[in-house]
Every structure is written in structure tokens, then in C-alpha cells.
Image (cartoon, rainbow, N blue to C red):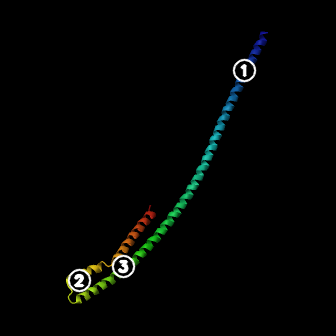
């Protein structure tokens, strides 16, 4: 009977060894399956992040194009406004020069006629000259000229800022 027991023991040991091998293989397969599942999950996350990144890049590109179009339009409008301001300034200056020449002519005529009056003196002539120099039309024209010059300078600065950020 010793032979049977020994064979049974070998079968038990072989069976035990076989079940340990099967358990190790099953554990290894579960480990591989978990690793594969984690890798697949990571791949899915990377794919989702890549899709979001691609959508963000497309949106940013579209926004950049819109911004470029808007800045081009602003630059064009600023050039047009600067040209219009320059034309207005030229017109105001011409008007001012015409008015100034007219006032100077009137002033000269007044002074000449004043000098011809009997009993006129230098003091009265000087006082009349000061009154003529302070005439509202001259003051108004000078102020308009200064205002248009400031406007032109502002537009030129704005245009330079928009054109060359």
C-alpha cells in the first residue's frame, strides 16, 4: 500500500502544482486585462483631450481671423477719418486766412480813415487798433483752427497706434 500512497501523494503534489500554475496564469491574465483596460482608458482620455484641443485651436484661429479683419477695418476707417480731418483743417485754415485778410483790410481802412479825421491822435488810434485785434471773428477763427489742429493730431496718433500696435 505504500506504493499507492506515494502515487497519490505525487498526484496530489502534481495537482497542487498544476492548480498553483493555473492560479498564477489566471492572476497574470487578470493583471494583463487590468493593464490593457487602463491603457485603453488612457488612450480614450488622450483622444478626447486631443479632440478638445483641436476644437480650441480651430476656434482660436477663427477668432484671430476675425480680429485681423476688424483691425484692418479700423485702420481703413482711421485713414479715412484722418483724410477727412485733414481736408476739414485745410478748409478751416483757408476760411480763416480769408477772414483774417478781410479783417486786416478792414482794419487798415479804418486806421486810414481814422487818421484822416481832424483831431485824431495816437492814443485814440492805438485804442481802436486793440479793439479791432480783439474782434470776435478773429478770436473765433483762431479757436477753430486750434481745435481742428488738435483733432488732426489725435486722429494721426490714433491711426499710428492702430496701424502699428
Residue 159 relative to residue 124: left or right? right
At x 38%, y 80%, the residue is: 95
Label 2 vs 3, first from the N-terminus: 3
Q: Position of residue 57 (x, y in %)?
A: 57, 53
Residue 61 relative to residue 103: left or right? right
Check disc 2: other Cα within 10 Å, few if <14, some if 14-19, many if 20+: some
Q: Which residue is identified by label 2?
A: 125
Q: Secondary structure at mark 1?
A: helix
Q: Position of residue 3 (x, y in %)?
A: 78, 11
Image quarter where the C terminus lies is bottom left
Q: Secondary structure at mark 2?
A: helix
Q: Secondary structure at mark 3?
A: helix
Circle 2 or circle 3, nearest the eye: 2
Check disc 3: other Cα within 10 Å, few if <14, some if 14-19, many if 20+: some
- Depth check: 51 or 22 in front? 51
Q: Which residue is identified by label 3?
A: 96
**Label placed on residue 16:** 1
Circle 2 or circle 1, nearest the eye: 2
At x 77%, y 9%, the residue is: 2
- Depth check: 31 or 91 in front? 91
**Label placed on residue 47:** none
Amino acid at each position: 500500500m505504500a506504493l499507492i500512497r506515494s502515487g497519490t501523494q505525487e498526484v496530489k503534489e502534481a495537482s497542487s502544482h498544476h492548480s498553483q500554475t493555473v492560479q498564477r496564469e489566471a492572476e497574470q491574465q487578470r493583471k494583463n486585462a487590468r493593464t490593457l483596460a487602463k491603457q485603453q482608458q488612457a488612450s480614450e482620455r488622450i483622444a478626447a483631450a486631443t479632440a478638445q484641443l483641436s476644437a480650441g485651436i480651430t476656434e482660436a484661429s477663427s477668432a484671430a481671423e476675425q480680429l485681423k479683419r476688424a483691425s484692418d477695418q479700423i485702420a481703413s476707417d482711421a485713414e479715412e477719418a484722418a483724410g477727412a480731418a485733414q481736408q476739414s483743417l485745410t478748409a478751416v485754415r483757408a476760411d480763416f486766412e480769408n477772414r483774417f485778410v478781410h479783417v486786416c483790410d478792414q482794419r487798415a481802412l479804418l486806421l486810414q480813415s481814422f487818421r484822416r479825421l481832424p483831431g485824431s491822435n495816437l492814443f485814440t488810434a492805438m485804442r481802436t487798433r486793440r479793439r479791432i485785434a480783439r474782434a470776435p471773428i478773429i478770436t473765433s477763427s483762431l479757436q477753430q483752427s486750434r481745435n481742428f489742429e488738435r483733432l488732426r493730431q489725435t486722429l494721426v496718433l490714433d491711426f499710428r497706434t492702430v496701424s502699428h500696435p
